[in-house]
């Protein structure tokens, strides 16, 4: 049976980012790290109209710059130069500008396949060994670590196991780690859209009584649509023919980008706020969507997970202990607690405030948007949240 210092279970965007944040320090210390992922990455990037994408905050760019990856990622990263926030049927709007914040962009929209390709290509295979395709079917605590059983019946032991296997983590459940689940009774409809006019790096957040929507700029003048509606209504929209769907979307969004000409494949995702009740145990860390899964409209979920991954790597590499020391893991958890609480709270309150039909809250958000545009301190605070800088102790 082989033994490693650290096993990262899940080689998606969060797990691969953690491996990259660790690899230079791990090489210097002689640590053995294994990355276990069920789905093998493609040998090369294949552009697709329907590619899923993620919004990276400016803070995420800083992390990837630190890891030496941003130059590669930026080749297909569409900068968000402005964010236009509006409330349908009401006069108030707000605009956030990269120029006003003194940054090259408020954030970037990157296709997940491209980001994943950049991350996997950045891995040093002499430091990070990978088991792919492979799946961990059983995780057992030992005196000084964990034993992993893989789907081919092989086993390995590790000093530290990191669960980064997604929001529906079966291993989290297997270990008896409970979750706090607050359903929004909504689904997110995800699709890519082509407008008739250039988006010029403008992102749109539009709030309606039926749920919020976002249009984010993509390469090739496409936009990534995240449209949140009640479950049955979301299903109805997903089943409309292309012409009817674009007509309904146009009626809600308006003509800020001219005529909406094309929509790609539509996908539905039920939404809820999910938080693991435990994120650290001796020799164990829960990371990414397995730790916290947020509403997508505020664009904070992956960026928070990336900050967690970087903070975990920093804590492990700053310690003289082997990975898995509980005091080190507790210190990491405490360091990230404020960031997580504020980010989760910000995302949840934005969702609830702007998704409410209650008249008092409707008036409140209308005044809030007006105040946001008129009061520089409030506007700057909101911008720093959007850029992933507002809750960092070093920001």
Image: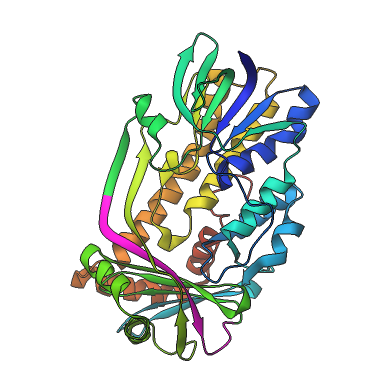
Tell me which segment is drawn in magenta.
183-199
* Vertical arrangement, residue 240 with respect to residue 160, above or below: below
Residue at x 35%, y 44% (from the top left corner)? 274
Q: Residue 99 falls in which quadrant of the image?
A: bottom right
Q: Residue 369 falls in which quadrant of the image?
A: bottom left
Q: Residue lying furthest right in this view?
A: 28
Where in the figure is residue 217, as x and y percent of width and height?
Answer: 56, 74
Where in the figure is residue 62, as x and y percent of width and height?
Answer: 68, 53
Residue at x 30%, y 39% (from the top left corner)? 180
On the rendered structure, is 74 left or right of 308? right
Taking depth in this image into account, of 94 and 35 the one nearest to the observer is: 35
Residue at x 69%, y 40% (from the top left corner)? 20
* Vertical arrangement, residue 55 with respect to residue 224, above or below: above
Note whether residue 174 is visible.
Answer: yes
Q: Residue 36 falls in which quadrant of the image?
A: top right
Q: How many marks?
A: 0
Taking depth in this image into account, of 340 and 117 the one nearest to the observer is: 117
The prevailing secondary structure element of the residues shown in magenta is strand
Note whether residue 310 is visible.
Answer: no
């Amino acid at each position: 049976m082989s033994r490693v210092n650290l096993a990262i279970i899940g080689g998606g965007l969060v797990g691969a980012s953690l491996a990259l944040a660790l690899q230079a320090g791990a090489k210097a210390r002689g640590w053995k790290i294994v990355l276990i992922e069920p789905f093998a990455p493609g040998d090369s990037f294949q552009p697709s109209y329907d590619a899923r994408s993620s919004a990276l905050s400016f803070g995420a760019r800083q992390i990837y710059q630190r890891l030496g990856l941003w130059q590669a990622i930026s080749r297909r990263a569409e900068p968000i130069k402005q964010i236009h926030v509006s409330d349908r049927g009401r006069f108030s709007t707000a605009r956030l500008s990269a120029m006003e914040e003194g940054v090259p962009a408020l954030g970037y929209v990157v296709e997940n396949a491209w980001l994943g390709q950049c991350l996997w290509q950045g891995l040093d295979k002499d430091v990070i060994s990978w088991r792919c395709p492979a799946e961990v079917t059983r995780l057992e605590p030992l005196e000084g670590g964990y034993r992993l059983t893989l789907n081919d019946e092989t086993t390995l032991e590790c000093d530290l196991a990191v669960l980064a296997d997604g929001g529906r983590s079966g291993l989290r459940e297997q270990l008896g780690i409970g979750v706090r689940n607050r359903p929004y009774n909504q689904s997110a409809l995800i699709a890519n859209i082509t407008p008739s006019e250039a988006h010029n790096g403008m992102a749109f957040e539009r709030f309606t009584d039926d749920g919020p929507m976002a249009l984010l700029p993509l390469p090739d003048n496409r936009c990534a649509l995240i449209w949140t509606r009640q479950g049955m209504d979301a299903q109805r929209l997903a089943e409309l023919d292309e012409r009817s769907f674009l007509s309904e979307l146009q009626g809600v969004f308006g003509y800020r980008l001219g005529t909406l000409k094309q929509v790609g494949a539509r996908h539905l995702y039920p939404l809820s706020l999910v938080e693991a009740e435990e994120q650290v145990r001796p020799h164990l860390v829960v990371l990414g969507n397995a730790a916290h899964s947020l509403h997508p409209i505020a664009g904070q979920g992956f960026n928070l997970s990336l900050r967690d991954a970087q903070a975990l790597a920093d804590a492990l590499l700053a310690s003289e202990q082997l990975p898995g020391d509980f005091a080190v893991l507790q210190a990491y958890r405490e360091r990230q607690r404020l960031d997580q609480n504020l980010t989760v709270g910000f995302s949840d309150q934005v969702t609830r405030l702007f998704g409410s039909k209650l008249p008092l809250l409707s008036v409140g958000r209308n005044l809030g948007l007006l105040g946001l545009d008129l009061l520089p301190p409030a506007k700057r605070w909101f911008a720093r949240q959007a850029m992933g800088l507002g809750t960092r102790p070093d920001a």
